[in-house]
Amino acid sequence: MVWNSQLSRLSCLLIPAILSIAVLPATAQVKVGSPAPEFAGTDTNGKTQSLDQFHGKYVVLEWHNQGCPYTKKHYLSGNMQTLQKEWTAKGVVWLTVISSAPGQQGYVTASQENNYLTQMHAAPSSVLLDAQGKIGHLYDARTTPQMVVIDPSGKVIYDGAIDDRPTSDAEDIKGARNYVNEALSASLAGKPVATPYTRPYGCSVKYSGQ
């Protein structure tokens, strides 16, 4: 009887706790098909770039970390630069976002990033320095790289990995299914995006406190 009484008392304590956990709101995520969260940030040339100034254009957001092996895969191979040049030539705005906090891997000054862009022959429209992680958290950016595609109406049409080969091996780029290419190509042709969301892969975004 004493044992049953203790079990009953324990149940009374645990059940409310379990229920309280169950109703906690989930982590906010960018919803494909919904309006992209508005943001403004300073780029490596000291200019303010905001999403609303690009209304009517396609926008790609690319989360970046120079020291991440998965990022190096796409830059040392030239894959990311090829994508940047191909799509910006077609009028797409490409914003590279660096959300690494000071003291964390991937954090860079404006001059350091500009030197990197020159060295890598990279061609984004702008690189936004998001050291406080405001843009990263707004878009629930989790990895580098992580890609978001926004259409001219301001809606998110793709969020996730750059491709279907979640490795740091540049050889795996060959034959990979590139989700960014697919999303932009389909939308520009007036077709729905076949795969609007995938699980991103890469290094974790180095926010403050990590």
Image (cartoon, rainbow, N blue to C red):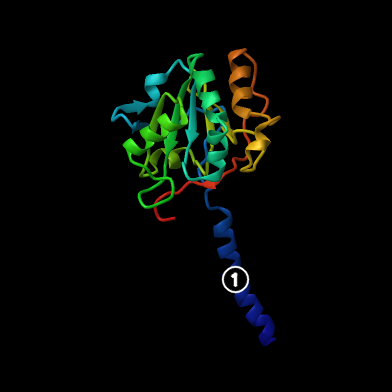
Which residue is at 37% across, 52% downward? 103
Which residue is at 53% across, 31% downward? 148
Q: Quadrant of residue 182?
A: top right
Please, what secondary structure does the residue beneath circle 1 have? helix
- Left or right: where does residue 52 sit relative to residue 63? left
Residue 113 sits above or below residue 1 on the image: above
Q: Is residue 164 visible?
A: no
Q: Residues within 10 Å of mark 1 (few under 14, many from 20)?
A: few
Relative depth, front residue between 47 and 140: 47
Q: How many marks?
A: 1
Q: Dot 1 corresponds to which residue?
A: 12
Relative depth, front residue between 142 and 7: 142
What is the x, y in percent for residue 175? 71, 29
What is the x, y in percent for residue 92? 49, 18
Task: Tell me the kind of residue under disc 1.
Answer: Cys
Q: Residue furthest left?
A: 46
Which residue is at 42% across, 18% downward? 55
Residue 27 sits above or below residue 159 on the image: below
- Left or right: where does residue 159 sit relative to residue 42? right
Residue 89 sits above or below residue 27 on the image: above
Q: Residue furthest bottom?
A: 2
Q: Is residue 207 visible?
A: yes
What is the x, y in percent for residue 146? 54, 37
Screen quadrant of the N terminus: bottom right
Screen quadrant of the C terminus: bottom left
Q: Quadrant of residue 137?
A: top left
